[in-house]
Amino acid sequence: MDPKLSEAIQQAAVHARRCAKTYKSGVNKDALPWRVIEVFDERVRGAVERDRRIEDERDRVLIAAVTLAEAPAEEEASVGMAREHLIDAIDFLEQAALRFGIPNGRRQSQ
């Protein structure tokens, strides 16, 4: 894989994990899913050929982010489980993009 694309994938995963780890329950919950994948969409999604496996993992990240955003703030165990689920989904998206991402020749701005 192209080293710049590989680096972009890893940076997108770092950004997504940071969003997941620092999210405060109930704060701007509608924006969380899009904030988690914004760097992936900006730098990676347009630079690789569409692949169902990558898209499925991206969808899993969005669903997990919604689950975290909707977890009741007073239920720390639920929030913790939802946060870990989101981080796992981000890890799977990163691995899918690294494994199945075929550069399409279009460079994304960084």
Image (cartoon, grey):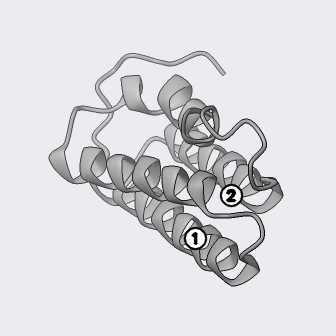
- Quick check: 47 above or below 100? above
Q: Mark 1 highlights which residue?
A: 82
Query: 16 left or right of 9?
Result: right
Residue placed most toward the observer, 37 or 107:
37
Which residue lies most toward the bottom here? 77
Secondary structure, mark 2, is: helix
- Label 1 residue SS: helix
Say which residue label 2 marks: 17
Q: Residue at x 75, y 78 (%)?
A: 76
- In the rendered view, tell whether residue 25 sits above or below residue 47: below
Instruction: Work out whether residue 76 or residue 31 is closer to the camera in this orientation and state it.
Output: 76
Kindly report which numbered mark, 2 or 1, lies closer to the viewer in this rendering.
Answer: 1
Amino acid on which disc 1 is placed: Ala
Q: CA distance from mark 2 to mark 1?
A: 13 Å
45 or 71: nearer the viewer: 71
Query: Which residue is drawn at the image coordinates 48% and 29% (left, top)?
Result: 41
* Horizontal and vertical percent position of residue 66: 50, 50
Q: Amino acid at mark 2?
A: Arg
Res. 95 image quadrant = bottom left
